[in-house]
C-alpha cells in the first residue's frame, strides 16, 4: 500500500490538487478528495478519490475503511441534495483506473433514453465535448456541492 503511484492517472490528478492545479477539485476530506467529473451529462457527477493508492477497499486498514465509507456516504448525500437527485448511483469499479475511487451519479427521471445504469448511455453522448462544463458552469457546480458538503460536515 502506497500513498501514490506515478503511473496512475488518479494519483496524477491528486498531485494536481496538491499543486492547486486541478480545476475539478471541490474539497479535501480525511480519507479522500472530492472532485467533479470532467463530463457532466449527469449534472453533479462527482468522484471521491482515496488518498491512498490501493486497488481494493479491503486493502485499507479497517478503521480507514470505515471512515472512507462514511465520508463517501456524506459526499453522496451532498451530491443528492446539491443537484436534486431523484436517485443516486454509487459505484466502486476500478477496472479502468485501479485506484480506489467512487463514482457518484445524481440521477433524474428520464435522464437516459432507456432506464438503467449510466453505462448504458452511448459513450459518444456521455462524453461529448458539450457535456464538459465551461469555467462558469464548473464554478457553480463546485459551489453548490461545497455548500451542501459543508452543511453535512458541520452537523
Image (cartoon, helix red, strand yellow):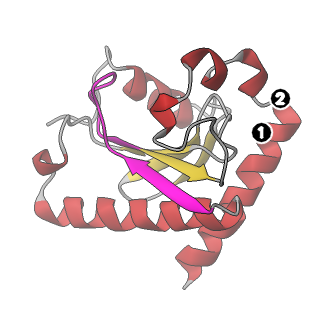
Is residue 77 or residue 145 the one in the foreground?
77
Q: Mark 1 points at which residue?
A: 138
Image x and y of residue 38, in percent: 62, 28
Q: Mark 2 points at which residue?
A: 134
Q: Which residues, given as a range, are shown in magenta?
A: 86-102
The residue depicted at 75 percent of the width and 48 percent of the height is: 141
Q: Residues within 10 Å of mark 1 (few under 14, many from 20)?
A: some
Image x and y of residue 65, in percent: 21, 59
Is residue 100 or residue 44 the one in the foreground?
44
Image x and y of residue 75, in percent: 50, 61
> For residue 97: magenta?
yes
Instruction: Name the side, left or right, on which 67 lies relative to 115.
Output: left
Q: How crowded is mark 2: few (under 14 residues within 10 Å), some or many (20 or more)?
A: few
> For residue 59: magenta?
no
Q: How many labels does the image show?
A: 2
Position above or below: 130 against 90: above
Label 2 secondary element: loop
Residue farthest along the right direction in this orientation: 136
| Quadrant in which the N terminus is drawn | top left
Label 1 secondary element: helix
Image x and y of residue 49, in percent: 41, 42
Instruction: Name the side, left or right, on which 88 lies relative to 43.
Output: left
Instruction: Name the side, left or right, on which 80 lies relative to 89.
Output: right
| Quadrant in which the C terminus is drawn | bottom right
Instruction: Name the side, left or right, on which 31 lies relative to 154.
Output: left
Position above or below: 130 against 65: above
C-beta proximity under 8 Å, tags 2 and 1: yes
Position above or below: 149 against 143: below
The residue depicted at 49 percent of the width and 27 percent of the height is: 13
Amino acid at each position: 500500500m502506497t500513498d501514490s503511484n506515478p503511473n496512475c492517472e488518479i494519483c496524477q490528478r491528486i498531485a494536481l490538487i496538491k499543486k492547486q492545479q486541478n480545476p475539478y477539485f471541490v474539497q479535501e476530506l480525511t480519507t479522500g478528495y472530492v472532485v467533479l467529473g470532467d463530463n457532466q451529462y449527469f449534472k453533479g457527477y462527482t468522484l471521491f478519490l482515496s488518498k491512498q493508492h490501493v486497488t481494493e477497499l479491503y486493502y485499507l486498514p479497517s478503521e480507514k475503511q470505515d471512515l472512507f465509507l462514511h465520508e463517501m456516504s456524506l459526499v453522496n448525500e451532498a451530491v443528492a441534495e446539491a443537484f436534486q437527485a431523484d436517485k443516486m448511483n454509487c459505484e466502486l469499479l476500478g477496472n479502468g483506473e485501479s485506484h480506489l475511487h467512487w463514482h457518484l451519479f445524481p440521477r433524474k427521471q428520464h435522464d437516459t433514453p432507456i432506464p438503467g445504469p449510466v453505462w448504458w448511455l452511448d459513450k459518444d453522448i456521455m462524453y461529448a465535448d458539450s457535456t464538459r462544463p465551461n469555467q462558469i458552469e464548473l464554478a457553480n457546480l463546485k459551489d453548490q456541492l461545497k455548500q451542501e458538503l459543508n452543511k453535512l460536515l458541520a452537523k
